[in-house]
Structure formats: structure tokens, C-alpha cells
Image: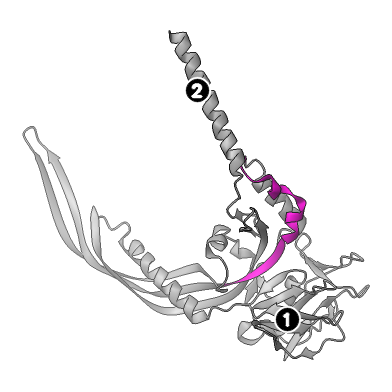
């Protein structure tokens, strides 16, 4: 069974959307603003907030596999009743027909209930402006890239991530050397002393992050980090209203294992730093004793662009909190070739002029 929810305006009955500028739920029709509802005790239960009342017709709707698309799932829009098809990891979306924002609450319940969320701090208008600033001044970008219709593919998406804190004991065993060089009038004396080194300490690594959606492009997602983790808020469905959201499909155990492997590599640097040796080599072991994992949704603006005759698709991501952009820009090879010819002509002309003056 699946439960869907649309945040309703208590004034006019239209749907509410989260506004990054005011950090409130806002009605795009009557302009009414209301606070994001507090965290619920039961994630799948209906909201009892007086400020925001979900659709009175909210009901459990059976989820079923879409025909001929085994990885797709269907649900019914509460606003217009249309049947919508989504991927199995979609947690928030819009109805393709009436455009009402919908949160699929069953995909955010139980073990899939997020521990926290960083709300969008940049609205769509500002995101488009900052994206245009990113590409503005790039001399060889295909001019078709600047057409307004490309920004119709601009979407705000909450992507899932695992945040981890790993505590354990690290131990280093190896050999260190100290070299002393003395210069005399007749010779240079080099003395090398070798030391058996053993160091051990309790270590805690914080703010470890791993993507929790296997299909997410890691190069792009890593390119828009970091986020300000001080802005992580307790999860509320209200933050998702008006945006898209994805549910995690990477198990906690896999992310935790990957984090422990990472900190094991960092442990050697921590244990051998400031040891007082000219060189030090050896083996480091790290034994994890405690792991604290949190499932967090992070805000991202996403743009897709088909930039050449072959239909190659370019993908871009923008940090929805800070505005950092990552993605490969399409190059206009004709413009680049003309620029190269122009530079060659100018350099050749200057060389000819210089030669004439010398002779």
C-alpha cells in the first residue's frame, strides 16, 4: 500500500510549495505563507498541524508495477486522479497533468525515513541566474546553450546521502629514520639512525559522506560539495513540496564499509604526522569500534542539455545551498577553430613586422 500527500493551502485550498527564500511553505496562487510542519512521530501518519492540512481525501493507494516497465511504479494523483508512473526510488515529484507537488510518504517511512535534510536555500529564479553567470564569458560554449528553452529542463532535486562518524583505534608499526649531515673542510659526514616505531591512538572521523543513490553521477555530485552541515534540519515532508526527491537504494552497511576503508587510509597520516623522523614507513591497522550513520537529503539543481547533432546529452548539477556548479560545457568547435586561426594570423603578422623592422 502506498500513501501520497499533497500539502494544501489552508486559505484557498491550492497546493503549497517550499520557498527557499522565505524558508516557509508558500501558496503560488494566494501568496499565503505557513511554517514547515514539525517532525512527526509516525512518518507515515497524516499531519495534525493546524498550519498545513494534507488533502482531506488522502488515502492509501495500492502500488503496482507498471506494465512492460519492471522498474517503474504507478500511483494516483490526489488532486486530479491521474495515474502517474515513477521510478522505484522516486520519493517526491509532480503530477504530469495538474502539476501538483506530491510526496510519496511510504517511500520515506520506516527504514527509509530520512534523519535530516538540508533545505534549498536558492530558488529556481536565482539558480537560473547563477547558472547563466557560470556559462557567461565562456568564449567557446555553443551559443545554443544560452537559449531560454534549455532551462525548461532545470529541476530541483533532493538526492539521498549517507553521513557517517567513525570512531576506533588506529595502530602504526614501522621504521623511522633520522639523518644528520655534518660538513667539514675535508669531508661530509652523514649519520643515519633507525628507530622501531609503534604508535596507537583512539581516533574519530566526522562528516564522512557517501552517495545513497547508486545511479547518481559521483563525479558531478562530488563536484558540488561541500554543503554547510550546520544547516541540516530534522526531516519534514514540507521541505520536499514543490521539488523532486529520490529515495536511497544503497544499503547502510555498504556505505559504512566504504567509510571504514577510507578512514583506515587516513589513519596512517594521522598517526605518523609530527613524529619527528626524516622518513617513516610501516603498516597501519584501524579497528572500528563505533559508527553513527545518518540518512540525509541534500538539495541539488539539475540541468540536462542536448548539445550537438548526435544528440549527446550534457548533465550539470548545482549545489542548492551554495550555488556551486559542476559539469562539462559543450564546446563550439567552429568558433574555437576560428579563434585559433585568428591568433595564428596575429602572431604571424607580428613576427613578419618584427622581422621587417630588424632588417
Residue 119 seen? no
Q: Is residue 359 visible?
A: yes
Please tell me whether mark 1 or mark 2 is closer to you in this view: 2
Ranked by sequence position, the earlier of labels 1 and 2 is 1
**In front here: 338 or 251?**
338
Q: How many marks overall?
A: 2
Which region shows up in magenta? 139-161
Q: Residue 87 falls in which quadrant of the image?
A: bottom right
Q: Horizontally, is 294 left or right of 233 in the view?
A: left
Q: Is residue 92 or residue 335 the one in the foreground?
A: 335
> Which quadrant does the C terminus fall into?
top left
Name the outermost residue toward the front: 310
Find residue 178 and report its horizontal and vertical position in percent: 19, 53
Name the residue tied to disc 2: 348
Residue neighbourhood size for the residue with mark 2, other residues' Cα within 10 Å, grouped as few (<14), some (14–19), many (≥20): few
Q: Position of residue 135 (x, y in %)?
A: 65, 47
Rendered image coloring scheme: one colour
Mark 1, residue position: 104
Q: Locate residue 191, reporting x and y percent.
A: 12, 49
Amino acid at each position: 500500500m502506498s500513501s501520497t500527500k499533497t500539502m494544501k493551502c489552508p486559505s484557498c485550498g491550492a497546493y503549497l510549495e517550499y520557498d527557499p527564500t522565505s524558508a516557509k511553505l508558500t501558496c503560488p496562487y494566494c501568496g499565503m505563507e505557513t511554517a514547515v510542519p514539525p517532525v512527526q512521530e509516525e512518518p507515515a501518519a497524516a499531519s495534525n498541524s493546524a498550519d498545513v492540512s494534507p488533502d482531506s481525501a488522502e488515502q492509501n493507494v495500492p502500488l503496482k508495477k507498471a506494465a512492460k516497465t519492471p522498474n517503474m511504479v504507478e500511483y494516483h494523483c490526489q488532486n486530479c486522479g491521474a495515474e502517474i508512473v515513477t521510478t522505484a526510488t522516486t520519493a517526491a515529484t509532480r503530477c504530469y497533468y495538474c502539476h501538483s507537488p506530491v510526496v510519496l510518504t511510504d517511500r520515506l517511512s520506516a527504514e527509509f525515513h530520512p534523519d535530516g535534510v538540508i533545505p534549498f536555500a536558492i530558488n529556481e529564479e536565482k539558480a537560473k541566474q547563477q547558472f547563466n553567470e557560470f556559462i557567461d564569458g565562456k568564449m567557446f560554449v555553443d551559443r545554443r546553450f544560452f537559449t531560454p528553452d534549455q532551462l525548461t529542463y532545470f529541476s530541483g532535486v533532493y538526492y539521498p546521502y549517507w553521513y557517517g562518524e567513525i570512531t576506533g583505534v588506529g595502530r602504526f608499526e614501522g621504521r623511522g629514520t633520522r639523518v644528520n649531515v655534518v660538513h667539514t673542510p675535508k669531508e661530509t659526514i652523514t649519520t643515519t639512525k633507525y628507530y622501531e616505531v609503534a604508535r596507537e591512538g583512539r581516533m574519530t572521523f566526522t562528516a564522512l559522506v557517501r552517495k545513497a543513490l547508486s545511479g547518481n553521477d559521483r563525479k558531478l555530485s562530488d563536484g558540488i560539495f561541500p554543503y554547510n552541515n550546520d544547516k541540516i534540519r530534522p526531516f519534514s515532508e514540507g521541505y520536499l513540496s514543490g521539488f523532486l526527491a529520490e529515495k536511497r537504494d544503497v544499503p547502510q552497511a555498504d556505505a559504512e564499509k566504504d567509510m571504514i576503508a577510507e578512514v583506515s587510509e587516513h589513519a596512517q597520516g594521522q598517526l605518523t604526522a609530527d613524529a619527528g623522523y626524516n622518513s617513516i614507513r610501516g603498516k597501519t591497522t584501524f579497528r572500528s569500534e563505533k559508527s553513527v550513520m545518518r540518512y540525509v537529503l541534500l538539495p541539488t539543481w539539475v540541468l540536462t542539455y542536448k548539445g550537438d547533432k548526435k544528440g549527446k546529452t550534457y548533465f550539470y548539477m548545482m549545489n542548492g545551498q551554495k550555488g556551486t556548479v559542476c559539469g562539462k560545457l559543450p564546446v563550439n568547435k567552429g568558433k574555437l577553430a576560428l579563434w585559433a586561426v585568428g591568433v595564428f594570423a596575429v602572431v604571424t603578422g607580428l613576427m613578419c613586422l618584427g622581422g621587417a623592422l630588424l632588417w
